[in-house]
Image (spheres, rainbow, N blue to C red):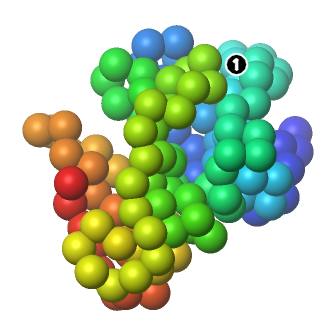
Amino acid sequence: MSYGSHIGGITHSPVTGDLILADAANSILKVLNATTGKLVRTIGEGKIEWPVGVACTPSGHIIVSETFGCRISVWTMDGERVHSWGTKGDQPGQFNRPLGVDLLSDGGIVVVDHVNDRIQIF
């Protein structure tokens, strides 16, 4: 099955079991049924700028690195933006093409800040 071009990342929701794809080329997240592969919903249409990294918290919130937006955003599975931070730059809390995101066991968020050649932990 094809799910679009430039799929940047994939994670799963520990709450629903659904898969979440970061579709960079279409600047959306795609939520898929993990069993059937069918599209359940899209998230962030017109609100996300080139999503690449994606991770899901134990409570089901989706963490997204918006590579061209130079920010990190947090979404509900229902498509509501909960929080976002970051601007383009090289200071702490700023990003230049953030790519991967992951969660630490203490709930912290790790971000690969690609052009700045660093990781940042929040």
Query: Mark 1 — residue?
Result: 33
Q: Is residue 33 left or right of residue 99?
A: right
Identified at 70% across, 19% down, the residue is 33
Which corner quadrant of the image does residue 49 belong to? Answer: bottom right
**Given the current orientation, which residue lies at the most extreme top position?**
16
Identified at 80% across, 60% down, the residue is 25
Residue 85 or residue 75, whichever sits in front: 85
**Given the current orientation, which residue lies at the most extreme left position?**
106
* Rendered position, 56 above or below 118: above
Which secondary structure, mark 1?
A: loop
Q: Position of residue 1 (x, y in %)?
A: 87, 39
Q: Identify which amino acid the numbered label 1 is placed on.
A: Asn
Q: Position of residue 4 (x, y in %)?
A: 85, 50
Q: How many marks?
A: 1
Identified at 51% across, 68% down, the residue is 70
* Rendered position, 5 above or below 90: above
Identified at 28% across, 67% down, the residue is 93
Dot 1, crowdedness within 10 Å: few (<14), some or many (≥20)? some
Q: Position of residue 47 (x, y in %)?
A: 68, 46
Q: Is residue 16 left or right of residue 39?
A: left
Q: Quadrant of the C terminus?
A: bottom left
Q: Position of residue 46 (x, y in %)?
A: 77, 46
Q: Is residue 122 left or right of residue 27?
A: left
* Rendered position, 50 above or below 57: below
* Rendered position, 114 above or below 13: below
Does residue 75 appear in this view? yes
